[in-house]
Image (cartoon, rainbow, N blue to C red):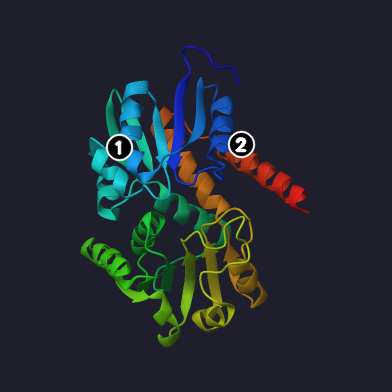
Amino acid sequence: MNLDSQTVMYGVFGDPVSHSKSPLMQNAAFRAAGINAAYAAFRVSPENLAAAVAGIRALGFGGVNVTIPHKVAVMDHLDDIDEDARRIGAVNTVVNRNGRLFGCNTDGIGYVRSLKEETGFAAQGRRVLVLGAGGAARGVAFALSREAPELVVIANRTEEKASLLAESVNRAGTGAHCRAVRLADLASLGERFDLIVNTTSIGMHPNVDEMPVDEDLLDRLVNESATVSDLIYNPPETRLLARAKARGATVHGGLGMFVWQGAVAFEHWTGVPAPVQVMREAVERELERQQKETN
């Protein structure tokens, strides 16, 4: 990568952010597309978010991705927000349009595209459980609700946050019924689901032995032909997915969603079709390298 005075900067804002593979993926995409741009990870604490967003304008960044914990808070600092992102209540991509900052959400689009391509799962008429109620959960819940499921249940450690998300989905008028439950009360539901999606960071490297629900509860929640999905892409197979696979469920890791949400962001920034396969291979190579070092 050759940096010069014409190079346009992009990046990802998060806290923590050192684990992110977005720089590898997006820099590979810029090289493949022949675009003079560079992408880096920036650790931004919540108290510095406003200053960091102002820095996008001040330094002439082309745009940024936004990850945990900023997907909701960043909305207060933008000039324009895409209507879908406004309904979702979370932004993961910011585009600098001549000094005006435009926010959108590519999480849900990326997730549904990946789920369909990799598993063939169709949500219409099915029962869906979403674990977590943060920024990623919002994008996924709204995107899945548009696929006409019978039911979407949001389970979160605090029921209030889950209830707010469920109410937002119901107000959007997609036709899907969405309700909330405390994570601790899942065991008492007595319901089984066709799709379970983990949107939390529980089980992410290096805490690979953790699960968002215990193994016995997972067994009671899944239907015989269920799909279990995890937004985590490092490790490629979380403990949650390994357990689900062992009991016969179809499993879906987070790499596809990660690549597709990044590809849509790339296209928002550049107006150029994203080199999706190049992006995926860049992340796969790095994950394989990490796995070899661990072993």
Disc nearer the start of the sequence (2/1):
1
Q: Is residue 239 visible?
A: yes
> Disc 2 and disc 1: Cα gap in Å?
33 Å
In the rendered image, residue 223, in percent from the top left (x then y), is placed at 52, 80
Give the farthest residue toward the front.
Answer: 47
In the rendered image, residue 101, in percent from the top left (x then y), is placed at 29, 32
Q: Quadrant of the N terminus?
A: top right
Image mark for residue 129:
none
Badge 2 amino acid = Val
Badge 1 amino acid = Ala
Q: Is residue 250 left or right of residue 72?
A: right
Q: Is residue 47 left or right of residue 23?
A: left
Helix, strand or loop at disc 1? helix
Q: Residue at x 52, y 79 (%)?
A: 222
Question: Disc 1 marks which residue?
Answer: 50
Q: Residue at x 54, y 69 (%)?
A: 228
Helix, strand or loop at disc 2? helix
- Quadrant of res 99: top left
- Vertically, is 250 above or below 44? below
Q: Residue at x 65, y 41 (%)?
A: 281
In the rendered image, residue 103, in percent from the top left (x then y), is placed at 31, 40
- Vertically, is 26 above or below 71? above
The crowd level at tag 2 (other Cα within 10 Å; few <14, some 14-19, many 20+) is some
Number of the front mark, 2 or 1: 1
Q: Is residue 44 left or right of residue 204?
A: left
Image mark for residue 278:
2
